[in-house]
Image (cartoon, rainbow, N blue to C red):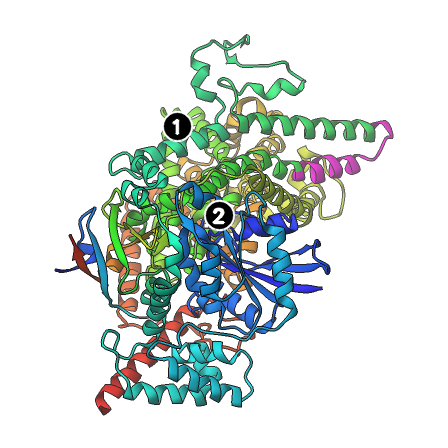
Amino acid sequence: MKKKLSEFAVGDKGVICEVAGEGRVRRRLFDMGVTPGAEVQLRKKAPLGDPLEVRLRGYTLTMRKSEAEQVTMEVKK
Amino acid sequence: MKHFALAGNPNSGKTTLFNALTGATAHVGNWPGVTVDRREGVYRKTPEPVSLVDLPGIYSLSPYTAEEVISREYLLDHKPDCIINIVDATNLERNLYLTTQLMEIDVPLVVALNMMDELEKNGDKIDVKKLESRVGLPIIPISALKGEGIDELMTRAYEASQTPREAVTVLNESALGHLIGDCRIALEGAEVEHSLFHAVKLVELDELEVKAHPASAKMVEDFKKTFSDDTFGGDFEAIVADSRYKYITAHYSSSLTRNVERELKGTRSEKIDRVLTHKIWGIPIFLMILFVIFHLTFSENLLFLGAAFSPNVVDELGNEYWVSLPGTVAEGLFGTDGIASPGVFLMNLLSWGTDSLTGAIADGLAAIQAPEWVSGLLCDGILGGLFAVISFLPQILLLFFFFSILEDTGYMARIAFILDRIFRRFGLSGRAFLPMIMGFGCSVPAMINTRTLSDEKEKISTIRVIPFFSCGAKLPILTAIAGGIGLSFGLPHTDLITYGMYVVGMVVALVAVLLMHHTTQKGDVPPFIMELPSYRLPQLRSTMLLLWDKTKHFIKKAFTVILLSTIIIWLISHFSWSWKFLSDEEMGQSILAGIGQFIQPLFTPLGWGAQLGATGWVFAVAAITGLVAKENVVATFGTLAACLGAASLNVELDGGLSAVAAMISETGVGVPALIGFIVFNMLTIPCFAAVATAKAELSSKRLFAGTLLFWVATSYAVSSMFYTIGTWWWTCFIWLAAIALVVVLVVLYNKGIIKPIKPWRRRAKRGTCGCDCAGCVHRGDCEAALAEVRAKKVASKKDSE
């Protein structure tokens, strides 16, 4: 099942299928290791619901929902 | 002498390694992106001394951030003899991503695998021999913090620097391998240095490269027409980034054995975060931490112990005081309301020292019968001004100490995480909160702290509004005038005026940020894709080095810019136009008073100008002396009240209340004008120390001038608003109309319906201004224009197909 990273609930895991968007933000996501094939888990949401805290490639990354919207995930059970 | 460069991800321990190798005082922080300028130092244990350059922390060599451009230009143009790539072993994959880019440069490269001790503690393992053979570069495990392995690292790096290294790439097997090869051959034909690096960047259609090598760029464009990837289409930049990570996962990651149990259970940092960034408790805990820091730095009543015990001295009037051993070092141990906090105690201690010094010099001068103006200039002018500025140092340093601990431990990044949602509305990221809140203590450390902001526009806006968060030195102005109003006009609850002014400051700051976000500092909200570093214990040594660094900078400033300006202010306030020395009480005839009388009409809309007549200049003069240090405002009131004819008043006795009351009765000033005066002082150009800091932190003179203008304009407008509405309530309609007009104009301007006349705003081109793109204020324009051009190209290509 495919889902956007921004629609994940806390604890959901998945593998990145696609990273949309363009320019600076997309390149930044790539540079931080958010590339197709990487396994990602949504670990937490900030107290006000945004930004998100995700775990990938053995480290913790934070991004806004608007940025996570660009990332399509294959949900893993 | 050999030249080595240190390159690596932010927060990978690069600066710690640099300090360990050179013993230098470079600042280390657990905040991604602390090193903005590069630092240099020398390592001497190799056969030949090595000069080391600490480059800013970067994740990639893309052209999108200032740090990346600086590092890239350094590595390519300065040709170091060796690059030491520091890699955080606990975060292997993402760190090696940069390594795959560095190997494309024709310079010897060694990898320092840092934080091996932490990796082992986590229960993870790296097979270093296996990784070394796979990567094909010397890899040396080290612990920069403990100094383990760093001499071996330098020996291996020195060996590596003896022979040139030919660049290699991990992209050969990717879909673009052939294209990169072709580009490289073409560039080599044109005798371009670092041909492989430039070839890869050309294939990525990197804006800097396309401009530099248009012929080869055309080749890439032609190839692009015939090529389409299943996942990425024609986005070569994405294909390159993806291929790198694919290669890393396929070839390097197998050397790493992760402790699966830990990853499932959650790391130590995650356990800490369960509390510190908790859904409900996260924000209250943050506010609590902030309160404790401010309490320890500024409170005169530590832990509110004053209420538990009764003061030890009661004077004839029934006033109760806390006094401890007057005239000794321990005098400052008690504040006025109880036991002093460490910050207040240190400040009292310092002022005890400086006062004794000034006293001794005054006595010495009296003993040798020096002329009055000499001792006045030396003791009141030079020493008085300098010590007034230096007296903040203990509290500034203490505040810095606490905030650098927050930064070192990694909590600072969490604060940004918690608060980002709120600040995004104002076009800022959550990181901007800290410098602003520090402003309540002192603007100087607050402005220095804006270095942690990655976005230039965010940084400019933040520096500009920091003084609006009323600092510790402005509080006496608020309390003295509010108290004076209470005394003279019999108003109750004057402390409400004080609180109200704090709120006014914050509201003006938010409005100003919003306005700048929609006009001069326009741009997208900066992206917030940030690493949350693991929690670490703060390193006391590096914190102390940082404090020492700050002290040096501050003292240097105090003895140059600030010294000069205090001397000038003293001279013009103690000499008449005929160059005759005046005592404090005769300040009414001084050059400064003359200037005050001359500019007095300017303040008429603020309530303390022409309408006050012959005595009104005192307010103008007090505001000018406030530029040295805001404490001077109240002190000047005391002096000027005396020269207006009131009996000599000691402002230290009652915090300036009676001086203000005397001023009110002598000048006949009203409440709205006094409020206007407070607002003006709160929002206008801050003290010299803060101005000097703003100048150092802003990247250009133009920005600095704009900032000064912004402060003057804001304070003038807001202050006259308060005065006019306070005097004639119906003027609020005029102000509302004016505000509505501004809002409408800004909205129309942003929708492109009206175009402002802005002769000074040119669309800068690289090279025309002689400065670098990295720090350019028009960078946003260039990027926007470039994106437009790119979009058009893509569209036209689609049409032609």
Which residue is located at x 60 percent, y 49 percent?
B19
Which is nearer the eye, B561 or A71?
A: A71
Which residue is located at x 64 percent, y 29 percent?
B351
Q: Which mark is residue B243?
A: none
Q: Residues within 10 Å of mark 1 (few under 14, many from 20)?
A: some
* Quarter of the image with the C terminus of chain B in it: bottom left
Is B658 left, or right, of B482 in this rendering? Answer: right
x, y percent for residue B698: 52, 58
Q: Secondary structure at mark 2?
A: loop
x, y percent for residue B603: 48, 48
Whether residue B389 appears in magenta in the rendering, the answer is no
Is B644 left, or right, of B773 in this rendering? Answer: right
CA–CA distance in space, label 2 to label 1:
53 Å
Is B736 left, or right, of B691 in this rendering? Answer: left
Chain for mark 1? Answer: B
Which is nearer the eye, B780 or B614?
A: B780
Chain for mark 2? Answer: B
Q: Which residues are magenta?
A: B366-386
Q: Secondary structure at mark 1?
A: helix
What's the residue type where badge 2 is placed? Met
Q: Against B770, is B1 above or below?
A: above
Q: Against B621, is A57 above or below?
A: below
Which is nearer the eye, B93 or B259?
A: B259
Which residue is located at x 63 percent, y 52 percent?
B151
| Residue B685 visible here | no
Whether residue B374 appears in magenta in the rendering, the answer is yes
Is B607 left, or right, of B35 in this rendering? Answer: left
Q: Which mark is residue B495?
A: 1
What's the residue type where badge 1 is placed? Asp
